[in-house]
Every structure is written in structure tokens, then in C-alpha cells.
């Protein structure tokens, strides 16, 4: 396990042990905020050129205690989800709470590319930096995005903090959306959608602190 994955594992183990299966248990302060991001991840399957199965498979990288899986059940979405996370306690909870889905305690970087899924998503992992340097996080984020893309048949979705803000927080990782868009087009796929237009507050009048990227193969 690499340094950053271990750091994230230790941090989220502590957060989950304090807050449990709640929005705060996956390091979100507000329930609306986390549900909005779950919905953004699940929208990856909504593409006009998708010609796969009616019930696609989706890999949720860093699934935590299964919050996005609960959202999918609440919305009655026709999708088969496999969640992976390095925090064993979270996976144990998810297995007990949502037996309709599959959960594994695993490091995504150790997964074989033959274990493919129609879609792969990663919510709120690449937004964190903690005490890691920016160059280290840049390398980690590109490595994770590339790994996700190698595991998908159709497309991936992930979110990142945007540099288009009026202030930053030291423990978060901010990405220039234009630079990321260029890298995705040049190094990953010509089919890229960047959603930089949603509010971070329930009122709809908040600043846009993060954005979601969708990258497709077909």
C-alpha cells in the first residue's frame, strides 16, 4: 500500500470510529452536500452513446460505509455496485447493511485489469491532501484516474476541488480544471465532460468549490 493510500486509510478509520455511518463518517459536514455528490457520481451511467446492459455494473472506489449504495437503493436505480475500500471496518458495516451489493476490503491499485466494470467512480478521495505535498497528490491523482479508466468498460467519474475559488484550505487538494481537462483529453480519452456548474450549498447560492469529471471510452 502506498503512502497516500495508507494516510487516507488511517484518517478515515478515525473519522468512521467517531461518527459512524453518517455524512460526517465520510468527512462531509452536511447531508445535502454528500447526497449531491453521490448523485453526481451515479450520473456517469447517463450517456447518450451507452449501448451496454440495462443493468450496468459499477465499481465504487473508496466506498466507505456504503453511503452511495444506500442512495442508489433509495432512488431504485437499476445498477449492480461493487464497493471497495481500504478501511475494513467500513466494509464490514456495508456488507451487513446492504447485502444486495458486493463490498470488498481492497486497494484499487492491486486490482487486476481483467476485473472490469462498466463504470468506475471515486467520490471525495481526490479532494483530500492532508499533509501530503501538492506534487505528490498530482502524481497520485493521475495514477488513480488512470487505474480507474483501465478498470472500466465505458466510463469513469470523480470529483476534485477547483482552483477557481476565492480561498483554499490547507488539508484539501485543489486542481486547475482547465489543466485537468487538457491532461484527460491528451492522455486518457477524447470523451470528457467537466461539470463545474453546481452549487455547494443547499440554498443554491453558494460558491462552487469542487467539480465532477466524466471520462468515457466510447
Image (cartoon, helix red, strand yellow):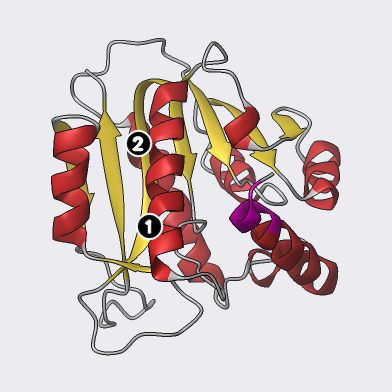
Residue for badge 2: 44
> What residue sits right under mark 1 in the picture?
138
Q: Dividing the image into 4 quarters, which one contains the C terminus?
A: top left
Front residue of 21 and 218? 218
Q: Position of residue 94 (x, y in %)?
A: 77, 43
Q: Measuring from the top left, give residue 156's x and y in whole percent.
A: 37, 34
Q: Residue at coordinates 60% horizontally, 35% vertically from top-left?
A: 108
For the residue labelled by badge 2, is the local secondary structure a helix, a strand or a loop? helix
Is residue 101 positioned above or below 1 on the image? above
Q: Mark 2 near mark 1, Cβ–Cβ under 8 Å?
A: no
Task: State how far apart marks 2 and 1 are (Cα).
Answer: 23 Å
Q: Position of residue 135 (x, y in %)?
A: 38, 63
Judge the density around disc 1: few (<14), some (14-19), many (≥20) Cα neighbours within 10 Å: some
Location of residue 205 (image quadrant): bottom left
Secondary structure mostly seen in magenta is helix
Is residue 12 toward the left or the right of residue 44 in the image? Answer: right
Q: Residue 43, which numbered label?
A: none
Q: Is residue 8 above or below residue 116?
A: below
Q: Which range of residues does the magenta coloring cover? A: 2-6
- Residue at disc 1, secondary structure: helix
Magenta span contains residue 3? yes
Magenta span contains residue 101: no
* In front of the other: 78 or 110: 110
Amino acid at each position: 500500500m502506498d503512502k497516500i493510500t495508507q494516510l487516507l486509510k488511517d484518517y478515515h478509520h478515525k473519522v468512521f470510529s467517531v461518527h459512524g455511518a453518517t455524512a460526517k463518517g465520510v468527512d462531509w459536514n452536511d447531508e445535502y452536500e454528500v447526497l449531491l455528490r453521490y448523485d453526481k457520481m451515479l450520473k456517469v451511467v447517463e450517456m447518450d452513446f451507452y449501448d451496454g446492459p440495462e443493468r450496468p455494473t459499477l465499481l465504487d472506489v473508496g466506498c466507505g460505509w456504503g453511503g452511495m449504495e444506500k442512495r442508489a437503493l433509495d432512488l431504485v436505480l437499476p445498477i449492480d455496485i461493487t464497493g471497495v475500500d481500504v478501511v475494513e471496518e467500513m466494509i464490514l458495516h456495508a456488507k451487513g447493511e446492504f447485502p444486495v451489493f458486493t463490498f470488498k476490503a481492497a486497494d484499487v491499485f492491486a486490482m487486476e485489469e481483467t476485473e472490469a466494470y462498466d463504470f468506475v467512480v471515486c467520490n471525495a478521495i481526490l479532494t483530500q491532501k492532508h499533509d501530503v505535498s501538492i506534487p505528490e497528490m498530482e502524481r497520485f491523482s493521475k495514477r488513480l484516474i488512470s487505474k480507474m479508466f483501465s478498470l472500466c468498460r465505458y466510463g469513469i467519474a470523480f470529483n476534485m476541488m477547483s482552483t477557481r475559488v476565492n480561498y483554499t484550505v490547507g488539508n484539501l487538494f485543489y486542481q486547475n480544471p482547465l489543466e485537468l481537462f487538457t491532461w484527460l483529453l491528451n492522455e486518457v480519452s477524447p470523451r470528457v465532460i467537466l461539470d463545474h456548474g453546481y452549487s455547494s450549498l443547499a440554498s443554491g447560492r453558494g460558491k462552487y468549490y469542487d467539480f465532477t469529471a466524466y471520462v468515457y471510452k466510447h
